[in-house]
Image: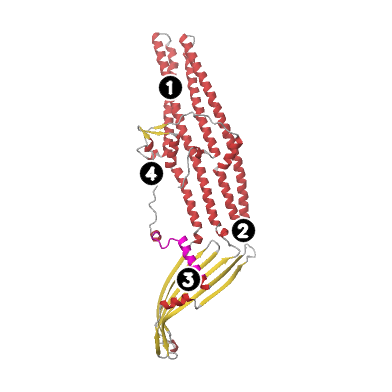
Amino acid sequence: MVKRLITLILVGVLSLTAQFSTFPSKSYFRQQWSKPPLNVEIEPVSHLRDFLYDSKIELSLRAYLELVMSNNPDVNLQKLAIIEQRNNIQRAYSPFDPNVIADFRSNRSTTPSIDQLQGADVRSRLNQTGGFTYSQSLDTGTDYTIGYTGGKFADNSQFANFNPSITQSMQFTVSQNLLRGRGRYVQRIPIMVAQSRLAQTEEQVRERILTLIFQAENAYWNAINARERLKVEENNLEISRAFLEQEKLRLELGAISPLDIFQPEQNFANAQVRVTQERYRLQQFEDAVRRWIGADLNPDFRHHPLELTEPVEPRFYMEIPDPEEVVARALGNRPELAQTRRALEIDDLNIKGFTNDIRPDLSINANYSSQGRSGNFFDRRGLGGTIAEVIPGGFPQAIDQLFQFRYPTYGFGLVLQLPLRNRRAAADLANAAIQKKRNLYNLRSDEQTVRLEVLQAISGVELSKAAVNQAKIALGFAQKRLDAEQKKYDLGVNTAFFVLQAQNDLVDAQAQVLAQAIAYRRSLLTLLQSTGELLGARSIALGSP
């Protein structure tokens, strides 16, 4: 029965070794002697050439966000946090890693004898020992050790019966927790905590990338807004130039006095100033867009013009469903709420772990060993007499005796550690319960914040939609008023002042339509961010880093 038990244990050890260790594969030795990875590099910016057309970088919103996900360093930094947490899961398995210790010692001594019983005038001895110990902790709370020790002892004493004497020994010890630390669930709590932290980190990364995409899309709309405002101002500049040329012609014909030319000239100069301002403003926003997609890092693309192809006005205006339905979606999608829920899972695991620490520590241990002995046997006639016969022996005979289990030693014991008072474990358990309550309050507060943000975002979308319609109506009236003032001026019943004022009002109305259209785009963006659906709406998938 004992032989069978030892055989099953050895088979189990070999299978566990294959599962938890790569020894003795080639990769194991290559990793042990590999150089430290000091030449760590990052990938260069990519995919910019895919969007280069006629010396322009042509970007739709989707293409722009794809480049942001590929090239922006802030986005790539977030992905590293996930890899770190995956490494922490691997570290959490380390208590169950097997370990092998091998040793060999050789010692020779020569000493003068002090009595005849030492068997020689000058005692010369050679002692060589070696062996290995294999130990491992299992996730059931079981610790076991398998050891092998071999020795060779040679002596010139005439009393020695075995010279050299070869001894072999194999030991097996096992210890099992019965109260504290018993069972796979308790032993695997650090692993489950690491897995929950990985899920929590993934939600943190999703939250940060969602914020980065929100900022990047805002930068895209800033550039489009600046570009369209520049077009409005350039159109106004052309209208002011045409009106100024008309007034100069009337001045040459004597239809107006020289004092009447100053107002059109001033209006034209103001239009030139606004065009110059908008050009520099557009350049600043386009530089920000280049930074988001990494074009500023590549000298081949740094100075290429940008062509942002997304229309200012959406193809259709979103119909907002029931606000409570939108809030419910947000409560299920927002990454910060998922982080807090993961934190509650970790709190539960910590509470169970600290509850385990309070229990008494009772363990059972058992040991079994087998011996083997061999060597050249000197059959002497009496103590220290002449040698009658020499029976040769060696290592194979000792191994044979070892695995015949003819000389076993075995035993077992119980160890109870009963702390009369464990203030540290009690305090840890109490603090874990407090931390869970704190996270529950945080979850409630975050849910209230999300609800408020979603309702405000819905109001912002509805307000922007109404503002766009009102701005279009105002633009129509501004155009009609300009036409009316121009006709009055042509009939001579009005002055240039009213025409110029109507032109400025038309420019302001055009700019207001543009501003409200961009504001509607931003309101939609804010709503998608507040519901946590921005990444899905932009077809952005956070794959494995």
Residue 235, labelled with which disc?
1
Left or right: 437 in relation to 276: right
Judge depth for marks 1 and 4 and give the one in front: 4
Badge 1 density bin: few <14, some 14–19, many ≥20, Cα 10 Å: some
Does the CB distance between marks 4 and 2 fall below 8 Å?
no
Left or right: 528 in relation to 240: right
Work out whether mark 4 precedes mark 2 in sequence or the reverse, and give the earlier one.
Answer: 4
Judge depth for marks 1 and 2 and give the one in front: 2
Foreground pick, 485 / 96: 96
Q: Identify the main secondary structure in magenta.
A: helix
Residue 63 vertical placement versus 505 (above, below): below
Work out whether mark 2 precedes mark 3 in sequence or the reverse, and give the earlier one.
Answer: 3
Mark 2, residue position:
355
Mark 2: amino acid: Thr
State whether residue 122 appears in this view. Answer: no
Does the CB distance between marks 1 and 3 fall below 8 Å?
no
Could you tell me residue 215's position as x and y percent?
48, 37
